[in-house]
Image (cartoon, rainbow, N blue to C red):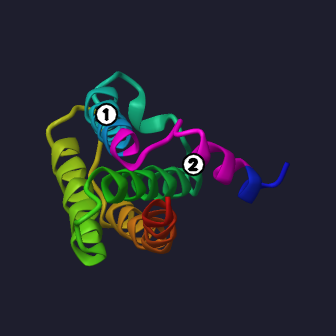
Amino acid sequence: MTATHLLNYLNTNILITPERLKFLALGMLILVIAGIFIGGEAPGAGSLFPPPWDKVVHFFAFGTIGVLAGLAFPRLPLGVAWVLVVLIGAADELHQLFIQGRQAGLDDLLADALGGLAALPVIALLRRWLLKG
């Protein structure tokens, strides 16, 4: 079964409706952001991923935040979704200034911003798919 067949099956059997996906994405978005901020305060959280892998984690984590935000708020323009990702990344870096053993970095924020940027075409494709359904 190809991905197209799977998507058609899901659409025709109404397992995933745009409304359900919007709420699922919102719930997941809240969980991911909470995980970053709450988990970031755990002892040793700053050393979980050694360089350069920490930048890869930032890229994918904030790309995921971008996709989830784009699905949770389908009328949100793509540029605004990207700015939202960057603001959340900046808030995370600011938050780290107040946590012992953590350090904020513009390099992390850059990885966050690039992850959010990479999410934009994914958001556009998913939105187009949802409009067809």
Q: Earlier in the sequence, mark 1 or mark 2?
A: 2
Q: What range is drawn magenta here?
A: 6-21
Q: Give the side of residue 112 with respect to residue 125, left or right.
A: left
Q: Which residue appears at 29% of the width and 41% of the height?
A: 26
Q: Amino acid at mark 1?
A: Gly
Displayed quadrant of residue 86: bottom left
Q: Nearer the viewer, residue 83 or 46?
A: 83
- Residue shown at the point (32%, 41%) measured from the top left: 29
| Residue 8 against residue 122 in the figure, above or below | above
- 13 magenta-colored: yes
Q: Can you name the residue that lies furthest to the top here?
A: 43
Percent from the top left, x then y, of residue 88?
Answer: 22, 54
Disc 1: which residue: 27
Q: Badge 2 is on which residue?
A: 11
Mark-to-mark CA distance, 1 and 2? 21 Å
Residue 127 x %, y %: 43, 65
Q: Nearer the viewer, mark 1 or mark 2?
A: 2
Q: Nearer the viewer, residue 20 or 125?
A: 20
Q: Nearer the viewer, residue 31 or 13?
A: 13
